[in-house]
Image: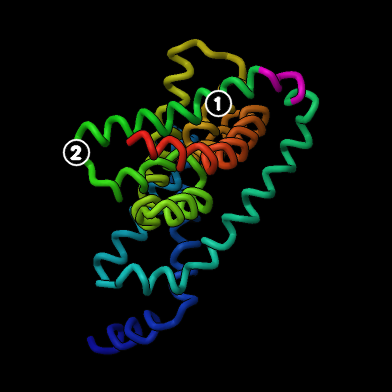
Amino acid sequence: MNEPFSLWVYLSTTPLLWLTVTFLAWIAADALARFFRLNPLANPVLIAVVLVACLLKLSGTPYKTYFDGAQFVHFLLGPATVALAVPLYANWPLVRRYMAPMAAALLAGSVTAVVSTLAIAAALGAPRTVLVSLAPKSVTAAVAMAISDQAGGEPALTAVLVILTGVIGAVIATPLMNALRLRNYAARGFAIGLAAHGIGTARAFNVDPVAGAFAGVAMALNAVLTAFLAPLLLRLF
């Protein structure tokens, strides 16, 4: 009875354990999502998060211990974001054609995402730290955490809010777009990338390559714009 426990104690101190757990959780989550034919409700990110969180809870492992082992995945957020330039280049003629409406949608969407969130949170009496942490929730995690940290928020809380925003957006985007009878995949992709960053972009690529390309464009542009707008809009609250 003591041998498995002793083995776990040994493995839990090695950084590669949690990196391996993260990869295995994602592989299992992705397989489950494909089993359900990529149904929006079977979101692989959400499934993987639940699997890892349950293991951490059952094993009594602190988050810091997990992150020390899995931080390489966090590092890859940067290169993964840069890699979105590939589908952007492949669809550049289409992107150039929609440049003007994209600029208008980007400004409206970015301002709305920040102001609506801050207004609701402030009306509910959220403290200043929470307001700052909430402001960049629609931006990809690496950028959102940096914005939150520099403005005086809690980067860890921001990361959780970013994941929740992305998962909710990825789950409801396709049914919502279908209900609105929006058939233009460029518009669909841009909307989900703007509102639900990387997780939404991954979902858009599963639906259509053009939607994925425009989602990647929206995610990248929104990260840059929100980095400038969030500190300014926070002054209003």
Q: Nearer the viewer, residue 195 or 232?
A: 232
- In the picture, measured across the screen, residue 121 lies left or right of residue 189, that is left
Q: Is residue 146 above or below residue 84?
A: below
Q: Which residue is nearer to you in this view: 59 or 125? A: 125
Q: Residue at x 36, y 48 (%)?
A: 133
Q: Quadrant of the C terminus?
A: top left
Q: Which element type, helix, strand or loop, lies under badge 1?
A: helix
Q: Please name the residue shown 56% across and 41% down the image.
A: 223
Measured from the top left, where is residue 39 in percent x and y? 44, 33
Are dots 2 and 1 in contact, CB under 8 Å?
Answer: no
Are there few (<14), some (14-19), or many (20+) residues within 10 Å of tag 2?
few
In this rendering, the answer to whether 175 lies above or below 121 is above
Q: Position of residue 169 (x, y in %)?
A: 43, 33
Residue stretch in magenta: 96-100
114 over 108 or under it: above or below: below
Give the residue number, with chain letter if any, for mark 1: 107
Residue found at x 38% / y 50%: 158
Q: Residue lying at the far top in this picture: please name it.
A: 181
Tell me the kind of residue under disc 1: Leu
Q: Quadrant of the N terminus?
A: bottom left
- Residue 181 covered by magenta stretch: no
Relative side of 126 to 69, left or right: left
Which element type, helix, strand or loop, lies under badge 2? Answer: loop
The circle drawn on residue 125 is 2
- Is-magenta flag for residue 98? yes
Residue type at mark 2 is Gly
